[in-house]
Structures are given as C-alpha cells and as structure tokens.
Image (cartoon, rainbow, N blue to C red):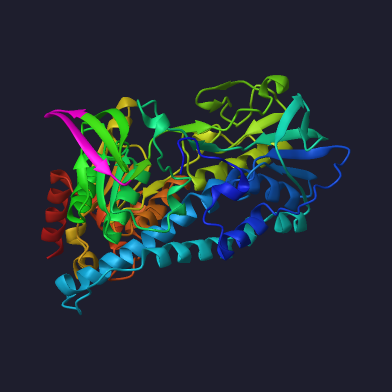
Amino acid sequence: MTSAASHEPDTLVQPMDAHNRRLIANVHPPDWKNPAPRARYHLVVLGAGTAGLVSAAGAAGLGATVALVEQHLMGGDCLNVGCVPSKGLIGAARAWAAARDAERAFHGPAAGGAGDFAAVMERMREIRADLSPIDSAARFRELGVDVFLGSGAFTSRETIAVGGQTLRFRRAVIATGARAAAPPIPGLDVVEYRTNETIFSLTELPCRLIIIGGGPVGCEMAQSFARFGSEVTLLHRGAHLLPREDADAAAIVQGALRRDGVRLALNTTITRVSKRGTDIVVSVRHDAGEAEFVGDELLVAIGRAPNVEGLGLELAGVACTPAGVSVDDRFRTTNSRVYAAGDVCSSLQFTHAADFQARAVIQNALFFGRVKGSNLVVPWATYTSPEVAHVGHTAASAKAAGLSVHTIDVPLHDVDRARLDGQTDGFARVHVRAGRDTILGATIVSEHAGDLISEITLAMTNGLGLGAIGKTIHPYPTQGEVLRKVADAWRRTKLTPLVKALFRRWFTLFS
C-alpha cells in the first residue's frame, strides 16, 4: 500500500499465504530456468497478460516457433489484480446483499450480524490460485512456447534481449499492458493509498473508505465495500457516474449505490490529499464550496499508463505517445515487423478486447490477414447491481457520425421475469438505422446486463437485424425476453397508417 506500488512478483499479491504462494509458483515460479533461445523465432511476445497469452498460444498451436517474455506475473491484470479478484469480491458482496434483502423483498428469514470479510478475501485468493494453472509458465511450456521470465527490451528492429540472452524474430508483439497511474493531486505522493493493483491485498474491512473516481472500478468497489459494511464515500468530478454511459443508465446505478449506503460527491474537484494522525483527509471544491472527507483507506480508481518504459522502443523504430504504442488499424506499429495488442495500444482496455485483438494480430502478422481493429464489435459491462452493458453507438455518437437512428426502449418493468425476481430497475435500449432494422448500438441496464448484451453483439457482428432477434424464440420467463420485446416494439413501428388501412381493407374483403 504505497504511493508508487512495487511490481516485483512477491509484492504484487499480498499476503503471502498458501494461496498466493501457489499463485506465484504458477505465474512466476522462483526456480524457473529460461530456455536456450532458438536461432530465430517466428514470433516473440513481450508481456504475458491476456493479449500476450492469446498471441503466444494461438501462434504456437498453428505451428509457429514462439517465445514469450514476462517480467512480472503471467496472467497480467486480469488474473492477478483485475477481472478475477474483483468479480470474486463482487460475487460475495451480492450474496451478502441478497441475504439481507431476502426478508424485505421475499419474506425470507432475517439475516443479521457481521460477515467475515477476511474469509471473503481468502476465498478470492484461493479461487485465483485455482485458476492460475491456465496462465502458468509450465502450461505454456507444454504448449510449445519458450517462456522467458525477466525484463525484455528491444535491442534492434529484429532482436529482443532478456536475461542476458538475445531473441531474434521475424515478427514480435508488444503486449505489456497498462498500470494504475494516479493523477497529479497535491499531497497524493506522500499519502499511502490503494489502486486496483493493491486493493485486493486487504485482509481487514476498512471502516471508512474513500474512493476517487466514478468510473467502472470506482463504482464496482464502492458498492461492494458498502455492502460488506464499510462507510464508503465516492468522489467524482463529473455530473454523473460512469461518464461513458447514457445519463439515465448512470442515474440508475447512482440510485442503487445510494440505497446501498454509498455517499456520493459529484461535481467535485480534489484540491489536496493529506494525513491527520492516522486519518486520510481528502479536500475538495464543489458547487456548495469546500469540504473535507476523512477515511481510513483511500482507493484511487482513476488514471492508467501504458507499460512502455524500458522496452527499447526507439531501438526498434516503434513510435509511442503518452496513450501508448502507436498502431494502425491492423495493429502494426511503425516497425512493420512489430505489432501490438491490448491495453498498451488500445483505448478499449478490456480483457475480451485484448483477446480478439491478439487473434487479429496472429492473422495479420503471421499470415496474410487484413483484420481491422475498427471492424471488431466490442461490448463492455460494469458489474454493479444492476449492471450496465453497452455495445456500438450511443444516440449521441451515432448523430456525431452522421447516422440517422431510431431508438427503441423497453423498461425491465415490462418483463415478467424481472418483476418476479424483484429486479425492475433498468431497461434495454437499442439504436437501429432509421427505416431499417440494422443494429447500430445498444445499452442494457439490468442485474444480468453483461450476459444479455452478447445477443446484441452476436447480431451486430454477423449482420443480423432486430427482425432476426424478433423471430428467435426466447424461453419464458427469462429476463432475456426484454430483447424480443425490443424487436416487437420495432416491428410495430412498421404498422404505419397506410399499412393499417390496407389491412382493414383486406379483412373487409376477407369477411
């Protein structure tokens, strides 16, 4: 828990209990011996997060000779400090909330008393260790990949050095990801704080938790820790949380967070962070003047920086900016031999985006592929309760792109299963091209939005319109019916006054 988190393998995950020792033994074994390099590799991959692992496994599976270089922990953010631990916490927090809500919503038995937060965190560490063999150095060696643990850097346009050895390549992939990078807030450099890389090392529940940032990580952690019993304050500079989402979608999440006890401070500018004894004090300026918020722990949930330092990019002729490695639409860098994928080069910093970018890189770098990043249909989800999921255009972005759209909204209250589940806060919103059923984008707010958005993503990826969804039989009763209802609502718009008149004429003749 420092203002500049260490990235040494044995400090990235704490405490060093049996579960984390098992994790480290898989994703950065301390006794690992790097192999002797081959004369030349078809592909050398820098970084063993999602993009790097998919690139290496996919290329090796097709018969290429592959080297994989990782300085820290294989599995990257997703396994170690991202998707896996966060969803472990979120799942536990949802269960705690459901137990308390059962009496009110379903006349169930009363749930009282405090839960065991330490056991929640231990369960997360155990599951993370259970999953780690999938991303392990030993597994990738079995897949035929030469795994090199250590700091890798380009030494020329076609060589990479690691551990005193030189790896020659025909093609290389930069997949070193990104890291938490706190904003320049006065005093933050001298105050201990948490990021997504260290929040999962907690073993005791903070009594008072302050979170800076109302994006997905900030909202997910705010709701979860409030459900565990922390007094949570969420500070956000915008007028509404989740600024990438529609305002009414964010408003539903804001209401849910408030009901769970999160104190929201919107439209705030943080002026200073300081210590007062053992307390952390965050000073802000907002519409009503100035205020102070006091906590025991501080989570900074804004700011990311690409991991490009020390890679020797200049020796390889690879250009980069503060946003990351520069790539064209086929993920090729300014060195035609070198490609990049994942958080190090993309604004879409999601595990599933990195996965499919890596698949594109394999085709483009090793074969004659012409897969374009702009053609990938990438959904995303924020795992609050309810969840918010989105894919494609919003109404605003479609208008900015010069597209004429028709928008269909169906509230979850109109879906029988949502009412039976007591989960009616939310809606499904689909944007289609005006006059057609071509889907341009969608937003879903529901307890299962992250699952539901895949049906829309499938349709968009394969050129299926709302009409195809409307013709698809959905099991009753499910919350997925909301998408069939969207399609039905669109179909009813085709029943124009002229069409109605023709039908009336038909039935007159038919009688």
User: Which residue is the extreme one toward the right?
Assistant: 39
Quadrant in which residue 361 is drawn: top right
Please indicate, yes or no, whether residue 494 appears anywhere in the rendered image.
no
Please report the residue visible at 31 percent of the width from the left and 63 percent of the height from the top.
Answer: 94
Q: Nearer the viewer, residue 119 or 81?
A: 119
- Residue 259 position, x and y percent, is 17, 55
The residue range painted magenta reads 285-296
As drawn, 465 above or below 349: below
- Count of marks overlaid on the render: 0
| Residue at the spot 67% in from the left edge and 36% down from the top edge | 173
Q: Please state if 45 lies on the left or on the right of 353 as rendered.
A: right
Q: Nearer the viewer, residue 78 or 454?
A: 78
Position of residue 323 measured from the top left corner of the image (x, y, whole percent): 50, 26
Residue 201 at least partly seen? yes
Name the residue nearer the viewer: 84 or 288.
288
Left or right: residue 377 compared with residue 493 = right
Q: Main secondary structure of the magenta part?
A: strand
Q: Residue at x 62, y 38 (%)?
A: 175
Residue 204, placed above or below residue 48: below
